Image: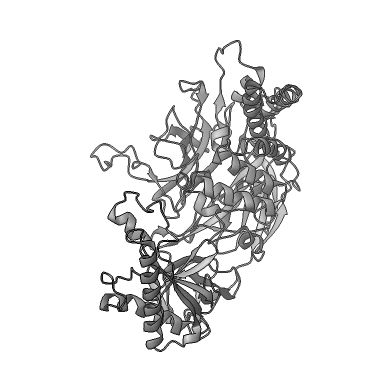
Amino acid sequence: MKNTITLLILCAITFSYGQNSSTEKADRLFDKMWYKEAAVLYENKIQKLEKRNKQDSTNQQDYFRVLKRAGDAYFFNTDMKNANRFYDQLISNFNEEVSPEYIFRYVHSLEGIGKYREAKYWMKEFAKRSKETDDRSKNFDQVNFEIEDVLNMEPRFLLKNLSINTKYSDFGPMYYKDQLVYSSTVDTSNFHTRIYEWNKQPYLNMHLGEMDGLESDVVNIGEFAKNLNTRYHEATLAFSPDETKVYFTRNNYNGKLGRDGKGTNHLKIYSAELAKDKDSTLTWQNVKELPFNSEEYSVGHPTVSSDGKLLYFVSDMPGSIGGTDIFVVDILDEDATNENGEKSNGYSTPRNLGEKVNTAGREMFPFITDRALYFASDGHLGLGGLDVFQSKVQDSTFQSPVNLGAPLNSELDDFGFIVNEEKNKGFVCSNRLSGKGDDDIYSFIREDIICNQLIRGSVANNITGESIADVKMILMDENGVKLDSTLTDLRGAYKFKPRLDCSTTFNVMASKNNYETREKLVLTLDKSGETIVPLGLDNMLIVKEGDLLKIKIGIIYFDLDKSFIRNDAAVELNKVVLLMKEYPRMIIKIESHTDSRARDAYNLQLSDRRAKATRDYIISQGIESDRIESAIGYGETQLINNCSNGVPCTETEHQMNRRSEFIILQM
């Protein structure tokens, strides 16, 4: 995010040990996450490389690497204008060499500057290149859900920038009694301001704000729990239902900073309890780090279920699907045992929420209510950067996430969403350019509308465009439970009866004999009305070969040296008859071919007799003779492989040349 520490991975403090003297200063700065300084040096390097011989392979390798680094330096600082400038050069010069991840970052940089049409093209390219390796591809392929679906959502949120926002980073709001606790880099020191080099801002601490009567603005009334704030970062917290226990994110710090083998100081979740001190004053005491923390990965951004039984959080721990995932643990009695019979220390083993919620990208800032899980993600289809998504809870299962649309989401990062479900009021954070500083906190009012949808549409032939009647249509929820079924009418139209929730995913399936079954995921619109779902089906008997349409049936067998229609041949030809009756304007021509064995003239005559016998059979079944333009035998003059006269071939290879073709001239 823009010059802040709100990303879990980037919240870590990295220490630089001794490095090889040949390592550039820019790389050292980049590895320490001093992206602004690194970007300047990378730009200077690029200018020098562009003046050299561009055909030199070593120069090209350096150019490729430094373009990536320059783009990343701006991308990780959420300067999408400059990130796009270098990613655009990277894609233009090294389109075939770049990994799908850089296509993904290029997409977000395009969205970040409002170029959604170009972003859509590169979303498809990312999906194509990463289809087999990255689960984000299905979210960006523009097949079931398109960027226009998000752009065209009806606005449901009214936002207001809060008075507490500063020129620095303000984010991570959480309700506490009738107040709001949030994280800020605002300096409260009267003596010495400690600066975090990554963004040249003071370290994050937790602050307390007083909400006005409308809960639309907040006034800072001081630090929240001074004894919990340290010399380093504290941010994003959650409370037990009775508000006597707090969970919060902090650098791995217990008198001194802890580090992994690479010198990185990761984040951890700590807890504290409200208790009376010796003066009978209630203070947060008994600070403990949670047992699933680690020196080797980060854990942070907690949220607690309303019954106090579940703690959700974000981590890049082993078992993560992407950069950061959302996990959950059961909150247990400290004396309880876990599933392995070991003392639990108060928590179960962390469980990943799975691929419906988590992606190969970043899922962050969860907030759980009785109705839904809200979280930020860049791995689901959004408007740019992190967007806020809602995953409804049904039978203890999270449903497919739905983007909450603009203006809640913007072209940059939007995250830290919390809401009072009953009041339809809450807070969200964003680094959108219209804010006061880096990350700002906004209050919002959510329009809670009674919303339902009907699904209707039509079914047509993918090749001809003609409507298809009597197609069986089935409506299912996203878990495969059947909700309704119907048939298409003579115009290929259908309509399901149930009234459905808005902004919810359903599955529509179409099936008919001789057609390939088609399924399509459908996201209903976000306002009452109808969601139109057109479907195209491929007739399994009609195929496209080059510029020709052909009727594809089984092999037509004839007896040796004969041309009469056998019973097994009649079964296949009856498929042609039925298809021509289904399409009464269809006109075809018949071509019959042989292999190269036997004399050329003999093969030509035999194939012509068979072509005309085939035509006569089709006419005998009720097809008008003028709908068969011609029936001609070509013998061995149009072989489709190299098995010509004198060439040794297998029986299978010869069989490929013994064929009857039904070419469609008109539909």
| On screen, residue 161 above or below 551 | above
Q: Quadrant of residue 306?
A: bottom left
Q: Position of residue 634 (x, y in %)?
A: 44, 67
Q: Position of residue 595 (x, y in %)?
A: 35, 60
Question: Left or right of 574: which side holds 250?
Answer: right
| On screen, residue 577 above or below 127 | below
| On screen, residue 309 above or below 169 | below
Residue 113 in sight in this render:
yes
Residue 367 in sight in this render:
no
Q: Position of residue 593 (x, y in %)?
A: 40, 66
- Quarter occupied by the N terminus: top right
Q: Nearer the viewer, residue 90 or 150?
A: 90
Q: Nearer the viewer, residue 604 or 474?
A: 604
Considering every residue shown, the one lying at the far top of the view is 21
User: What residue is at 26 percent from the left and 41 percent from the top?
Assistant: 337
Number of numbered labels in the structure image: 0
User: What residue is at 73 percent from the left and 21 percent from the top?
Assistant: 52
Question: Left or right of 131: which side holds 45?
Answer: right
Q: Which color scheme does this rendered protein use?
A: one colour
